Image (cartoon, rainbow, N blue to C red):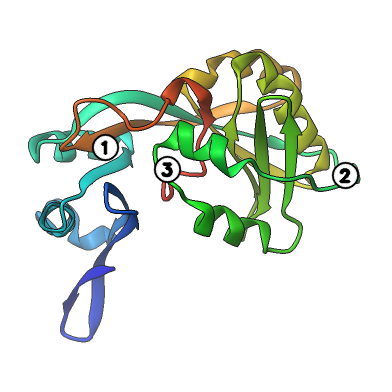
Amino acid sequence: VLWITLGDRLVATSAVLPYGGEFGWLSMVLVASEWRRRGLATRLVAECTSLLRNSGRAALLDAAPDATEIYAKLGFVPFCAMERWKGDGSGVTAFSESVDLALDQAAFGVDRRFLLDDFLSRPASLAFRSPHGFALLRRGAAAFHIGPIVADPAEASTLATAAIRASAGPVYVDVLDAGSSLAPTLTSLGFRPQRRFTRMAFGLSALPGNPARLLAAAGPEFG
């Protein structure tokens, strides 16, 4: 975590999550409203990227629309879009299955069992399996989050529907380009798109892993 303070006040923060020795995820670039447009976000992103480069890692992130230009000026290249959908769950009781870590590693490009194990250790977290994939449901501070969803696109609707039915209250799903087939299912269940992100990378000519199997993200702060 990197931050900028003025006197005893915290005015800007950023974070880097290393994934093995290959790349890291840059997130939580936040600047207090009265200190925006003064180059603080650019400075923090540049420092985070340098930290990763100095350790031999590429840098990836999910950029909000108003930050895409900042990242592009620093050398980040866009690769795909991500759209956050919001709706409500049904609160139906469900049993947790298991997460296929090998499938996740193949899709995401690195072993992130530490993250998925942490998600599953949280109260009310559940996993759902299909023949060739899985979806993970976890409870956040204000809403449930479904993701990652790793599967063949043909299995996406079944996995997403099972997770939504098991949720109680507001639910977010961060759908990547590869999961665009989820849109009709989400719409039919009352979900609506909220905001878009752009998945960008510095130091890579292509996204790691097999993006065609990564249908929904763990979240913009995790990838």
Numbered circle sitting on residue 174: none
Q: Residue lying furthest bottom in this view?
A: 8
Question: Would you call the spot at circle 1 few (<14 residues within 10 Å), some (14-19), or many (20 or more)?
Answer: few
- 167 on left or right of 153: right
User: What's under tag 3, amino acid-wise?
Assistant: Gly
Question: Which residue position is annotated with label 1?
Answer: 66
- Give the residue drawn at x 84%, y 38%: 90
Of labels 3 and 1, the one closer to you: 3
Name the residue rendered at 42%, 25% in the picture. 211
Element under label 1?
helix
The N terminus appears in which quarter of the rendering?
A: bottom left
**Mark 3 or 1 closer to N-term?**
1
Residue 112 visible? The answer is yes
Q: CA distance from mark 3 to mark 1?
A: 19 Å
Residue under label 3:
223
Q: Where 209 falls versus 57 (above or below)?
A: above
Q: Nearer the viewer, mark 1 or mark 2?
A: 2
The answer to whether residue 43 is seen in the rendering is no
Name the spot of residue 15 as percent of width and height, x first: 30, 61
Q: Is residue 214 above or below residue 121?
A: above
Q: Is 129 rendered above or below residue 184?
A: below
- Residue 204 position, x and y percent, is 19, 33
Please give the name of the residue rendered at 54% of the width and 21% of the height, measured from the top-left corner: 179
Question: Which one is in front, 24 or 170?
Answer: 24
Front in this rendered view, residue 145 or 99: 99
